[in-house]
Amino acid sequence: MRTAVFKSYKNGYFTFWFENGEELVFEEVHPRVLKQFDLKNDKSLIDKSFRITFVEDFEDDDEDFVIYRVESLKPI
């Protein structure tokens, strides 16, 4: 689990900034997380800090194409 700040949802992508200054864009969020946090519509979640767990999926065994998926969020 890492600490990250939710920055935006635009054009199907979820952007988080991590404590080390790294920005990651997620294409997928687990449906359970979206039930708990309406990241697509709830503007009050922008700039909120979370403990985040995510996975990297390699699309069709192509190591150059990675999809990042949020598995869990816990507000700080």
Image (cartoon, rainbow, N blue to C red):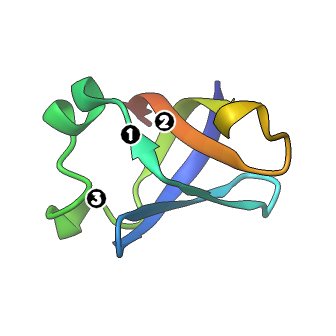
Q: Secondary structure at mark 3?
A: helix
- Can you say whether 59 is above or below 14 in the image? above
Residue drawn at (61%, 45%) of the image: 67
Q: Position of residue 45 (x, y in %)?
A: 28, 58
Alpha carbons under labels 2 and 3: distance apart: 15 Å
> What residue did someone put label 1 on?
29
Given contact means CB atoms under 8 Å apart, are the residues at marks 3 and 1 in contact? no
> What residue did someone put label 3 on?
45
Residue type beneath disc 3: Leu
Mark 1 crowd level (few <14, some 14–19, many ≥20, 10 Å Cα): some
Mark number, residue 70: 2
Q: Position of residue 63 (x, y in %)?
A: 85, 40
- Can you say whether 28 is above or below 27 in the image? above
Q: Is residue 62 left or right of residue 60?
A: right
Residue type beneath disc 2: Val
Mark 2 crowd level (few <14, some 14–19, many ≥20, 10 Å Cα): many
Residue type beneath disc 1: Val
Quadrant position of the N terminus in the picture: top right
Residue drawn at (15%, 62%) of the image: 42
Given contact means CB atoms under 8 Å apart, are the residues at marks 1 and 2 in contact? yes
